[in-house]
Image (cartoon, grey):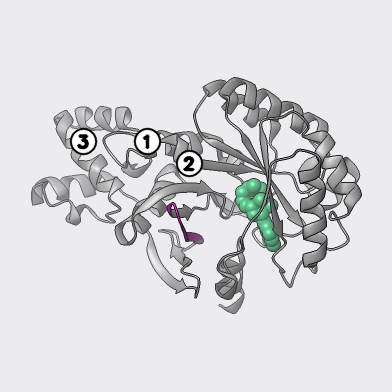
């Protein structure tokens, strides 16, 4: 089998070069080109044609084909990419005042089956390679200058942990994009053992935890993962994470009408997070037809927000972006595949 150069960390790429009789600077060149988002060896113009041919005989790099590119009236850009094996993933570019943020997918599909999410409607197809994660950032970065990355697209990154770690290493490698981990967020539905492992690495990432409910009864209804690692276990792991890394955790809370949006839920949430290095992001749920769950009214959102604030919790209501282009998790991939 050909070696996938896009998924090697720099040390392994040097070893690959070495074992093929190539000097270390060749590894630097290849790593730089991959980080620039090229999709073929032919684009590596400082490498001679015969060597490019040799490389393509023994190895591959990730190819992302832009299948669709939708631009929202608010400036959000959504890419539907086709992978080498024909699978589809989504990548979203969001413009904020502080710069462009790109939201990448970590798997094709998902097996977590959260009740409000479109990504797992057809289950998990496969993990993305580290190269396929990096290529999303690199490809978007060719068109728009990317200043931060969130691993919050399709898939559960902690369910693809080994590839996630290589991706995190490669994106910050000085030979490539050299992005500080302070500009990277990883979002999880709460795979507790992985949160603990990541904590030990003390990376300066932002961990986002999709909490969506402050008690087991509510959370069990909307997030099957809670039956394996319940709220108490999850929060304990989160506390450990903040202690090890000194980084604030961002808790995502999707407000769903009559499910998790009462004042009682807000009060329980405030108690749960009391004294923790934490921030809560409230997001009215994006309606997904197959899921039949509705967003909370503006009044309920306001009431929830006020209750948290009154109880000393750091909280913001997230702006929803890209509503006109199906920018919510997994929606575009799902619609495209359903139409095929
Ligand atoms: N699996 C990871 C990352 C992908 S989901 C996780 O669970 O965090 C990214 C975020 O979008 C999560 O917070 C998820 O709960 C949220 N999300 C999924 N579907 C949504 C919808 N229909 N409306 C609003 N948020 C949604």
**Label 2 belongs to which residue?**
184
Query: How far from the left and from the top, in percent, is residue 241?
Result: 63, 26
* Dot 1 or dot 3, earlier in sequence: 3
Q: Residues within 10 Å of mark 2 (few under 14, many from 20)?
A: many
Residue receiving disc 3: 28
Sequence order check, earlier mark of 2 and 1 = 1
Vertical relation: 255 (above or below) 46? below
Left or right of 333: which side holds 261?
A: right
Q: The magenta stretch spans which residues? A: 90-99
Please state the quadrant of the image where ligand 1 appears: bottom right
Residue beneath label 1, please?
A: 172
- In this view, 191 is above or below 323: above
Rendering coords of residue 41 (x, y %)? 21, 52
Closer mark to the observer between disc 1 and disc 3: 1
Q: Secondary structure at mark 1?
A: helix
Distance in Å between CA atoms under marks 3 and 2: 23 Å
CA distance separating discs 1 and 3: 14 Å
The image quadrant where one finds the C terminus is bottom right
Residue drawn at point x = 32 percent, y = 62 percent: 143
26 or 153: nearer the viewer: 153
Camera-side residue of 218 and 248: 248
Compared with residue 194, is residue 327 higher up or lower down, i.e. above or below? below
Mark in the foreground, 3 or 2: 2
Please tell me whether residue 271 belongs to the stretch shown in magenta.
no
Compare marks 3 and 2 and give the one earlier in the sequence: 3
Q: Quadrant of residue 234?
A: top right
**Is the C-beta of the residue carrying label 2 under 8 Å from the nearest atom of ligand 1?**
no
Residue placed furthest toward the bottom:
339
Q: Are marks 3 and 2 in contact (CB under 8 Å)?
A: no
Image point (46%, 54%), residue name: 102
Q: How many numbered marks does the figure carry?
A: 3
């Amino acid at each position: 089998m050909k070696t996938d150069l896009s998924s090697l960390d720099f040390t392994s790429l040097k070893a690959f070069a070495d074992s093929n009789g190539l000097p270390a600077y060749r590894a630097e060149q290849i790593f730089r080109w991959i980080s620039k988002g090229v999709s073929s060896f032919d684009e590596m113009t400082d490498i001679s044609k015969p060597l490019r041919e040799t490389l393509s005989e023994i190895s591959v790099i990730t190819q992302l084909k832009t299948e669709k590119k939708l631009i929202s009236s608010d400036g959000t850009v959504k890419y539907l990419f086709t992978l080498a094996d024909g699978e589809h993933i989504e990548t979203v570019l969001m413009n904020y005042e502080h710069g462009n943020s790109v939201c990448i997918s970590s798997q094709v599909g998902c097996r977590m089956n959260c009740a409000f999410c479109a990504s797992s409607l057809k289950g998990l197809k496969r993990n993305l390679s580290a190269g396929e994660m990096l290529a999303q950032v690199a490809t978007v970065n060719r068109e728009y200058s990317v200043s931060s990355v969130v691993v919050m697209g399709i898939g559960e990154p902690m369910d693809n942990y080994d590839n996630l770690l290589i991706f995190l290493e490669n994106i910050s490698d000085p030979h490539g994009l050299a992005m500080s981990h302070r500009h990277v967020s990883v979002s999880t539905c709460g795979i507790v053992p992985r949160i603990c492992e990541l904590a030990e690495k003390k990376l300066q990432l932002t961990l986002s935890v999709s909490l969506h409910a402050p008690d087991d009864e509510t959370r069990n209804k909307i997030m099957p993962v809670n039956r394996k690692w319940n709220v108490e276990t999850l929060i304990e792991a989160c506390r450990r994470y903040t202690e090890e890394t000194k980084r604030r955790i961002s808790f995502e809370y999707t407000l769903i009408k009559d499910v998790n949006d009462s004042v009682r839920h807000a009060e329980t949430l405030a108690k749960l997070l009391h004294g923790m290095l934490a921030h809560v992001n409230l997001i009215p749920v994006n309606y997904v037809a197959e899921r039949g769950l509705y967003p909370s009214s503006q009044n309920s959102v306001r009431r929830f927000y006020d209750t948290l604030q009154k109880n000393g919790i750091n909280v913001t209501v997230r702006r929803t972006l890209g509503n006109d282009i199906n920018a919510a998790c997994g929606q575009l991939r799902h619609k495209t595949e359903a139409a095929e």
